[in-house]
Amino acid sequence: MTIDTEVRRAEAADAEALGWLQQMARDTAVDQRGGPAWLAETPAEDDWASAVTRDDRAVFVGSVDGVVLGMLDLAIGERIAMVQLAYVHPEARQLGLGDTMIEHAIEAARTACCQAFEGVALPGDRETKNLYERAGITARKITLSTRLDG
């Protein structure tokens, strides 16, 4: 049996799937080290149908047999392209969707004449760190933090 995978730019018709994947990613982050802080500083997108058409974003989806099971949301600035969220459903991992979405995102950043490509991996999130490193994206700084409000 052949598995058909595809990565492409997201369209407005993908809004429901993007919202579902975003919620899964956020639910997963709750229990990860650094996850609550990341969630507090990273608001959820509430209008994916509009987000996929914005000039300062490049949103990609990865599908398996026509079902969208991966997403990558790239914010494109004047100099830096920053992965806001990358997520692949656990049952679709190891099929290359994440790697291919990163490749597409890097190409979008180059096309936009960005000088750097960045992403975030939470402490201990080896899968995300490995995804970035396979694409040649390595840590340039580690930010440490503590809460001061109790």
Image (cartoon, rainbow, N blue to C red):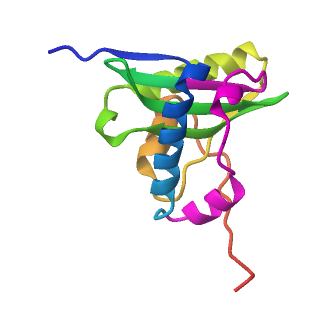
Is 3 situated above or below 26?
above
Residue that sits furthest to the left in the current view: 1
Q: Does the magenta stretch include residue 3?
A: no
Residue 29: give x, y in percent of width and height: 50, 57
Furthest-bottom residue in this view: 150
Q: Can residue 133 be seen in the rendering of this structure?
A: no
- Quadrant, the N terminus: top left
Q: Nearer the viewer, residue 137 or 102?
A: 102
**Relative image position of residue 19 (x, y in whole percent):** 54, 39
Q: Is residue 3 above or below residue 121?
A: above
**Whole-percent x and y of residue 50?**
71, 27
**Residue at 40% across / 22% down in the picture?**
63
| Relative side of 1 to 66, left or right | left
Give the farthest residue toward the right.
78
Tell me which segment is drawn in magenta. 33-60
Q: Decide if residue 8 is on the left or right side of residue 90.
A: right
How many labels were placed on the picture?
0
Q: Is 50 within the magenta? A: yes
Residue 96 visible in image: yes
In the rendered view of the protein, which quadrant contains the C terminus? bottom right
Q: x%, y% of residue 133? A: 50, 36
Q: Which of 58 and 108 is in front in this view?
A: 58
- The quadrant holding residue 34 is bottom right
Query: Which of the pair 90/130 is nearer the observer?
Result: 90
Where 58 sits versus 129, above or below?
A: above
Q: Which residue is drawn at 52% across and 33% down?
A: 16
Residue at image location 62% in from the left, 58% down from the top: 39
